[in-house]
C-alpha cells in the first residue's frame, strides 16, 4: 500500500474526532485543514494508479472533489484506491485459449542443416506470432514482410509497425513525465522505464539496423542516470545485457558483480557470467562456475540448459 494512505486516513479521522469532541468553530476549521491534507494525499496515491494519459491535472481534480464531498468523499476515494490496487495486482493471462479448428496448417519440407521452421507463411500464422513478443517471433514477422503473398506481407508489416509504434509512444509519454517529475523516487521510476523500453526495442530487434546503436545508447544513458539516483540490482542486470550486446565485456563483468552484491538472483546471472568469462577467455574460472553445479542443476531453466552444455 502507498505509504501516504495510512497517514491520510489518520489525518481524516483526527479531524473528525476534533469536531465530535469540541463542537465549536475552531474544531470545524481544524477539520477542514486536516480533511484538505487527507484529500491531497489520497489524490496523489490515485494519480499513480490511473493511466498515463489521464494523469495531467488529476491531483487537483481528485483532491477538489474529495474535499467538497467531506468524509463521504474521502471514504469513496479510499474505496477507489483499494479497487484500483486490487485490479493492478491481478495476474495477466499468459496464454490465450486456442481452438484446434483455428490452428493454421503447417507445411513441412526437407530441412537444411540449422533449419528448424517449415514453410509456414499464411496470415493466420502471422497473427499467432504477433501475439508473442520475443526475438524469434519478430524475426519470423520480418521474414514474412518479404513474402510473395500480399496478405501475409501486409499483415506482418502492419504488426511490426504496431509493435514499434506502441513502444515509441510509451517512450514519448515517459519523456514528458521526466520533464515534470521532481522527486528522486519518481524520477528514478521514469528513467528505469525509459531504459527498459529502449532495451526492449533492441532485444526484440524491431528497428532497422541503422537505429539499433541509437536505441542501445539511449538504453545505456537512461540506465546510468537511474543508477545515479539509486542503487538497484535490476538496473545493474539490464546494463549487463546492454554491455554484452555491445561487446563491452569489462563493463558487463563490473555490473554483474554489482548486481550480485545488491541481491539479484545468482541463478539468473549464471548464463551472462559464463558468456563474459568465455568471451574474455577465462576458461579456468568458467569451468569452476560450471563444476559448482555438478549433480545439482539450478532451477533457472536458461542457466541449467547452458550448464548442461558445458558439463
Image (cartoon, rainbow, N blue to C red):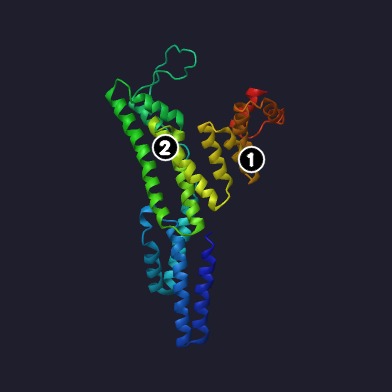
Between 11 and 214, the one nearer to me in the picture: 214
In the rendered image, residue 298, in percent from the top left (x then y), is placed at 66, 33
Q: For residue 133, what is the image quadrant?
A: top left
Q: Residue at x 66, y 27 (%)?
A: 282
Q: How many marks?
A: 2
Between 120 and 173, the one nearer to me in the picture: 173
Judging by the rendered image, the residue that carries numbered circle 1 is 257
Residue 131 seen in render: no
In the rendered image, residue 93, in percent from the top left (x then y), is placed at 46, 41
Q: Is residue 247 left or right of residue 179?
A: right
Between 91 and 267, the one nearer to me in the picture: 267
Q: Reading the chain from its start, which is encountered first: label 2 or label 1?
A: 2
Q: Residue at x 29, y 22 (%)?
A: 149
Q: Is residue 58 left or right of residue 41?
A: left
On residue 214, the disc is: 2
Q: Is residue 173 left or right of residue 27?
A: left
Q: Residue at x 47, y 67 (%)?
A: 41
In the rendered image, residue 17, in percent from the top left (x then y), is placed at 52, 79
Between 140 and 180, the one nearer to me in the picture: 180
Residue 258 seen in render: yes
Amino acid at each position: 500500500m502507498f505509504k501516504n494512505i495510512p497517514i491520510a486516513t489518520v489525518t481524516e479521522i483526527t479531524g473528525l474526532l476534533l469536531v465530535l469532541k469540541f463542537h465549536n468553530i475552531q474544531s470545524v476549521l481544524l477539520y477542514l485543514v486536516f480533511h484538505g491534507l487527507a484529500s491531497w494525499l489520497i489524490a496523489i496515491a490515485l494519480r499513480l494508479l490511473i493511466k498515463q494519459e489521464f494523469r495531467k491535472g488529476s491531483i487537483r481534480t481528485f483532491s477538489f472533489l474529495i474535499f467538497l464531498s467531506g468524509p463521504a468523499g474521502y471514504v469513496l476515494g479510499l474505496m477507489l484506491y483499494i479497487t484500483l490496487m486490487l485490479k493492478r495486482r491481478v495476474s495477466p493471462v499468459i496464454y490465450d485459449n486456442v481452438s484446434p479448428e483455428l490452428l493454421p496448417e503447417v507445411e513441412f519440407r526437407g530441412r537444411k542443416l540449422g533449419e528448424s521452421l517449415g514453410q509456414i507463411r499464411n496470415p493466420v500464422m502471422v497473427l499467432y506470432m504477433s501475439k508473442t513478443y520475443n526475438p524469434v517471433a519478430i524475426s519470423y514477422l520480418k521474414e514474412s514482410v518479404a513474402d510473395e503473398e500480399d496478405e501475409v506481407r501486409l499483415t506482418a508489416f502492419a504488426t511490426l509497425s504496431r509493435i514499434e509504434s506502441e513502444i515509441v509512444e510509451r517512450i514519448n509519454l515517459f519523456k514528458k513525465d521526466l520533464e515534470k517529475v521532481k522527486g528522486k523516487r519518481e524520477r528514478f521510476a521514469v528513467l528505469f522505464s525509459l531504459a527498459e523500453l529502449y532495451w526492449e526495442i533492441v532485444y526484440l530487434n524491431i528497428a532497422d539496423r541503422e537505429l539499433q546503436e541509437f536505441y542501445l545508447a539511449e538504453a545505456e544513458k537512461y540506465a546510468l542516470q537511474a543508477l545515479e539516483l539509486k542503487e538497484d540490482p535490476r538496473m545493474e542486470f539490464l546494463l549487463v545485457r546492454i554491455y554484452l550486446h555491445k561487446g563491452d565485456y569489462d563493463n558487463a563483468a563490473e555490473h554483474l558483480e554489482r548486481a550480485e552484491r545488491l541481491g539479484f538472483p545468482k541463478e539468473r546471472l549464471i548464463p551472462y557470467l559464463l558468456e563474459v568469462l568465455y568471451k574474455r577467455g577465462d576458461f579456468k574460472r568458467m569451468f569452476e562456475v560450471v563444476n559448482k553445479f555438478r549433480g545439482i542443476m539450478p532451477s533457472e531453466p536458461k542457466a541449467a540448459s547452458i550448464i548442461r552444455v558445458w558439463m
